[in-house]
Image (cartoon, grey):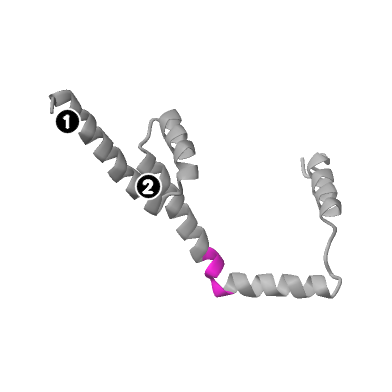
Amino acid sequence: MTSVDYSRQNVSLLRMKLSAVHDSLVPPSLMLEIEAVAAEEHRAPGEIVGEALERYLSQRKWFRDVDVHAKIAQGLESLRQGKGLDGEAVMAELLAELDEPDAAL
């Protein structure tokens, strides 16, 4: 076996090992996008994935908080009782307030 063949064999083996890791941790459908983002930001793909996992775990912890669930339950009950507000009307009010000149000036 020539050294070129040996190198190609090592490269193939390395790709198989990396593929096995990626398959177990990251769906193949996401790998190209992760690699593209990493290249664009001049960062390692693992850094991108790590950051995404940190954000997910942080948000997951926040949403599991008992107080958050209680507030969501209160909001749902208000909606069931017909006490909900129309989102478009609320936004129109907020935008109108922002457009008003400040009376204190």
Residue for point 54% across, 71% down: 65
Determine the secondary structure under disc 1. helix
Residue 22 — which label? 2
Closest to the camera, between mark 2 and mark 1, is 1
Which of these two is toward me, 96 or 37?
A: 37
Drawn side of residue 40 relative to residue 88, left or right: left
Q: Calculate the distance from the C-alpha at mark 2 to the C-alpha at mark 1.
A: 24 Å
Residue 57 coordinates in the image, percent (x, y) = 46, 59
From what the image shows, is residue 62 above or below residue 5? below
Placement of 84 over or under 27, stated as above or below: below
Taking the image as shown, residue 10 lies to the left or right of residue 87, namely left
Q: Are marks 2 and 1 in contact (CB under 8 Å)?
A: no
- Extent of the magenta region: 62-66
Q: Amino acid at mark 1?
A: Tyr
The quarter of the image holding the N terminus is top left
Callout 1: 10 Å neighbours few (<14), some, many (20+)?
few
Disc 2, SS: helix
Crowd band around label 2 with a 10 angstrom C-alpha radius: few (<14), some (14–19), many (20+): some
Write down the residue under mark 1: 6
User: Residue at 81% of width from left, 55% of height from top?
Assistant: 87
Q: Residue at x 84, y 75 (%)?
A: 81
| Above or below 18: residue 70 | below
**Left/right of residue 74 with respect to residue 83 in the rendered view:** left
Snapshot quadrant of residue 31:
top left
Amino acid type at circle 2 is His
